[in-house]
Amino acid sequence: MRALKEISSLVLLVCCGLTCHLSAQNQSPCCKSIEKSACVQALPVYADVNQPIEARVEDALARMTLEEKVALCHAQSKFSSTGVPRLGIPEVWHSDGPHGVREEIEWDSWSPAGWTNDSITAFPALTCLAATFNPRLSMAYGISVGEEARYRKKNVLLGPGVNIYRTPFNGRNFEYLGEDPFLASRMVVPYIKGVQSNGVATCVKHFALNNQEEDRMHIDVEVSDRALHEIYLPAFKAAVQQGGAWSIMGSYNKYKGQHGCHNEWLLKRILKEEWGFDGAVVSDWGGTHDTKEAALNGLDIEMGTYTNGLSTGRAFAYDDYYLANPFLQLLKSGEIPVSVVDDKARRVLRLIFRTSLAPNRPLGRTVCEDHSRVARQIATEGMVLLKNDQSILPLSVKAGQRIAVIGENAVRSLTKGGGSSELKPKYEVAPLVAMKAAFGAKNILFSYGYSSGRPLYDKVEKAPYDADSLLQAAVKTASQADVIVLVGGLNKNNSQDCEGGDRTEFGLPFGQEALIPALAALNKPLVVVLMSGNAVAMPWLKDAGAVLQAWYTGSEAGNALVDILTGAVNPSGKLPFTFPKRLEDNAAHSFGALSYPGDNVKQQYMEDILVGYRWHDTKRIAPQFPFGFGLSYTSFELGQVTASAPSYQAEDVIRLTLTLSNTGQRDGAEVVQVYASQRKPSVSRPVKELKAFQKVFLKAGERKTVTLDLKASDLAFYDEAAKAWKLENDTYTLQVGTSSNPSKNKVDVTINAASK
Ligand code: GLC
């Protein structure tokens, strides 16, 4: 009898509980029979979006079992990690990449899932964004790509990448923000804020020292503390402390003998303890190699390249991941305290409450006019005019004149390939298509000129074109035109601009170095357009009347290129990395194999802090084109710079003022750059370092007063002995210019750091 009574009251409780939950407001009849509080508590704290996040995290954590906490810490599929099904806490969906939302991938393999509703807007590569030197565009970029990730129901967008450009061979430089830590820091913060304004997390990568693809899975990078803090960490630090990044991706390579994905110094001491990072650390795919290190050194979510987390795929093996059952066993045995998994679970829950369980998230949207406009604006503002003899550009083609468009990159998709940042765009306007639309198809001739290895067959003889016949065909075509536009550069093939390997040659590939002079021999205006993400050798520079660095610019590539070639948009991009004349002029390639690519086990960054223009300045090696350089169709003049005071203390802001005039006939934009150098440092320092920049738009003939603020504390260097930044009392010269070339426009200021 008693059992029956108990069952009936249990049934009553369950049914009422359910009813209450479903209709907490209108007090269903049975609720009167239960404590009012039972009805009021229908919504647990973690599920109540009006509760503070930390209260929701703690409430959820308190309800979770050990197994559920461990499950949060590893993948359940190729691009998702577990939530807490029993509590209704959703799983976490991760997706590449920095330039757009990757197509859906199969649950358990790298193969595309073949969906028909996952095409997106392909935005320009981040190197192009860096070249805009325009943080406002970076915000627009983040908002737009974040909207597309939100619409595709992604919680974590695996980007942006901010690894510093150390060698022109790195296959993934196109994904990053260039060689200067200050530029990268300024450009990454708005992107992060833009993406995360959609309730989508960024996952800033690859933390840290992943500056090449050669041996990336294991190379042990040796670098001084000073270079680590002055060159390789600043963009990540800005991402965390100014951008508020919600997740960080560990790098494959090692540092101090430990893999980046579970590195005590990088993840525990610097990222979480020193910088106060409260988000989740995600491993690179297959970047986890040890359970104890992963548990104790700050990894929070292990994602896998294969279902055993490392090398081979087999039937569901996510439970074998290092942070799965092996981790659970160490927790159960007491060898690892539960507090360790609690910390990880808190960070993953916080990620979930900031994304899928966040209140009032925007809806997101994808493939819309706004996104196309943003993509096109970033592309046109990022393209860098390197040479323009006799103002060949903008093109002035008279009626009846014809343009020969030569080059495989005029027709080839450059959003496919390249590795994990590859995209399936809804559309991608090729340069040839846009040129025909702009100038009339009958005025445009085309020839491949070169081929990146895929056989091109002669229409008549069905014989594959070889390099020489491609060249001859191109010369023949070009001879019938009045202007020649070569659209070449690199591409996303292996050993070009592509993940997983580095370039093996510094020159342009596929026979372009022979093609350019052959075209030049026709004595017609020749424009060379480089679609690439890396510096290249330019033995042919004298042969080209104009050279445009056009990057990888995604869906709007052709339209943006035509905007610049026709003058619809005046180019204003600036190089985010140095173009050396010869590979051996580059710092990383000046110290033998141990410096680059390493000896297959370890690698030493022997140039230390002298990366990029810092090297060229200090070693007095003239570059082909310097960092920060870019021409315009108009001309600008800088007035003499003045400082707001003769001396400053550590916490002061130094305000520089100067006039900028557009002395030409076209509206345009210039990037005013401030480089600082210390007069008598107690340690060796680069000749100068970028410490402020501002992009200024001026109408033809317009003059503006420009002010640039820089923090006196930004003039410090990292003191290895003190393990802290040090600002020395001294005189500092602040040079103002429109590139990193030497400039006489300077002002000296004195720092009395400790005078208070
Ligand atoms: C790759 C890349 C990383 C990417 C991840 C998922 O190996 O290194 O950038 O986000 O795996 O595709």
Image (cartoon, rainbow, N blue to C red):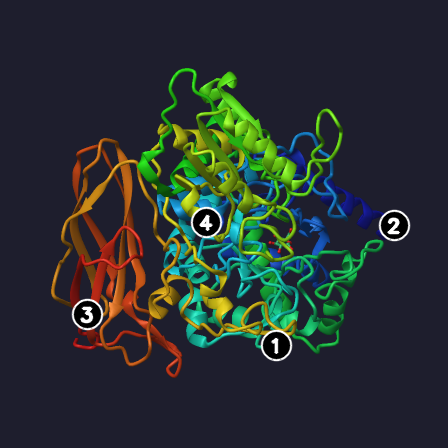
Cα distance between the residues tagged 2 and 1: 69 Å
Instruction: Determine if the C-beta at disc 3 is less than 8 A from ligand 1.
Output: no
In the rendered structure, find residue 192 and report the number of the disc placed on it.
Answer: 4
In the rendered structure, find residue 590 and report the number of the disc placed on it.
Answer: none
- Residue drawn at x 64%, y 57% as measured from the top left: 501
Cα distance between the residues tagged 2 and 4: 64 Å
- Residue drawn at x 35%, y 38% as measured from the top left: 571
Instruction: Determine if the C-beta at disc 2 is less than 8 A from ligand 1.
Output: no
Direction from residue 548 to residue 500 in the image, left or right: right
Q: What residue type is labelled 4?
A: Ile
Please name the residue that numbered disc 3 is placed on: 649
Tell me which label, 1 or 4, sits earlier in the chain: 4
Mark 2 vs mark 4, foreground winner is 4
Q: What residue type is labelled 1?
A: Gly
Cα distance between the residues tagged 3 and 1: 40 Å
Q: The residue tagged with tag 1: helix, strand or loop?
A: loop
Please name the residue that numbered disc 2 is placed on: 1
Instruction: Note whether residue 190 is visible.
Output: yes
Where's residue 690, x and y in %? 32, 60
Few, some or many C-alpha atoms within 10 Å of disc 3 (few <14, some 14-19, many ≥20)? some
Q: What residue type is labelled 2?
A: Met
Q: Which of 291 and 525 is in front in this view?
A: 525
Q: Nearer the viewer, residue 597 or 262?
A: 597
Q: Which of 708 and 484 is in front in this view?
A: 484
